[in-house]
Amino acid sequence: MHFKAHGFCGASISNFDYELNSHGVCMFTSLRFCSRMGVFLGAVVLFGHSGTAQTAHCFNSLSGPEVPCTPRSSGGGGGGGGVAPAPSGPSPAEIARRQRHAHALELDTRAHKAFDRGDKAEAARLFEEAAQLAPSASNIQGNRWYTRGMLAASQKNYETAIIYYKEALRYFGNNKELQENLKVAEEKAAVERGDWERAAKLLAKGAALKRYYQARQALVQEDWDRAVTDLTEFQKFISSAVTAGQKAIHEEEDALRTIKSLRPRDAPMFQRSLDHDRANVAEWNRLSRETDKYLAAAREGRTTKAEARKLDAQRQEQASNPNYPNPPPVYRDASTPRSYPDLNSYTPAQHAAHNDNDTGNTWAQKGDWVQALLSYQKALTEDPDGPFAKVIKENLDIAMKHVGPQKANAAPAGGPTAPPASPPVKAEEKPKEIVQANCTGWMTQANGSSFRLCTDERAQRYCEQSAQAGGKGVISRVSCQ
């Protein structure tokens, strides 16, 4: 700063600038003023004490201290020796630095005011200008990065905010608020990446939002039971938070109207608080809707998982069942006859065998195993060597196992009836010992003949055929195939 210099006794020394040191003391004075004072004082001493030589004294001002005197140059004229102190003070570079620093402090003050009124963008701009003017001012540099981080976070650019916050920590390493803002930015960045496990770890142990993050991680891992549990608990919290937040907003709106009428200068601060709470309630409402959606998905996933477990159990049971075919047309247990596909490549006889096998299955479902056995026997006669002849034979064996107990249960109380007398047969056609109780009833075929299925004393199956219906006529043992 520069001030105009004034001589004593009201005499002004015009157009002369004085540089002030740190204490505001003038560093040097007019050379002409100092010389005149030396001549004047020398003359006074000379006339007062003409017989004694006197030493000249020089002063910068009437009240200033004595300074060394120096002789005037030869070209100055007049008697007496002029004096002038050697000039000293800040260099031009230092003066410029101080001016920049003063301007930086002014910008810093304006930036704080912008931040206080909620204008983060303007505050960041002013702090940036101040930081350029004062690169060695740690507070200004810290505010620069801190404000840039807060501006980035408000724009949901959390990865950038993390970078700026970490820069600010170099200057404000112990600032708790800064550390908390960094953690929040890291949490939000993790959420944007879908790193729910990391987001949950950044929250305190008892934080309600931690449950939501854990549930989202469980959904990723298809841990449906855990997801349903955590989302259900978080849903309770978020519902109550929305209700409480909406109530607080109504109260703040009423308070703001009162403040605007009584203390208008405080209204902006209350308005910012109200806007903050409104933003929070809007975020909670969003989370509430998301929670409902993900909870429904978790419940559906749990149901699907239960059905999948049931299907897995069935597949394991089938794999362990020796009667399960590979590949299986239709699954059945060991005592249930089964069907097989009716292929387009079948011959007419094979189509007929397929239909007769299905007819046998129908009789088996009704419990009439005799009729089922006859149908299977007919199917096997029609298609003895086809691709599914094995299925027909298995169905025939199942029917045979049921026919014995069924006939025993159907026998009259007086015991089995004696077999009707059979007409004599040729010796070569006479079968081995035949037990009438071990045979089925006679079944008439389309050509008028009849046949029946029997078992011998060793439980071996064989068939008998008669040339006439009802077993009349010659009876001969034939192959059941």
Image: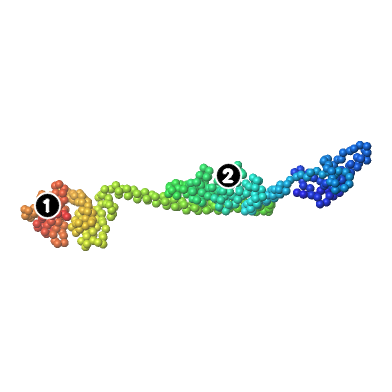
Residue 436 lies left or right of residue 330; in this view the side is left
Where is residue 197 shown, x and y percent of the image? Answer: 48, 46
In this rendering, position of residue 73 left or right of residue 202: right
Q: Nearer the viewer, residue 61 or 383?
A: 61
Quadrant holding the C terminus: bottom left
Q: What residue do we see at 16% from left, 57% from top?
A: 443
| Residue 201 shows in this picture | yes
Image point (61%, 48%), residue name: 146
* Circle nearer the N terminus (1, 2): 2
Q: Quadrant of residue 82?
A: top right
Q: What x and y, as percent, mark residue 415?
A: 15, 48
- Disc 2 marks a residue whose amino acid type is Gln
Query: Residue 179: which disc?
Result: 2
Which residue matches tag 1?
419
Mark 1 or 2: in front is 2
Tell me where residue 180 sits by quadrant.
top right
- Which residue is depicted at the point 81% across and 46% down? 29
Percent position of residue 330, x then y: 28, 54
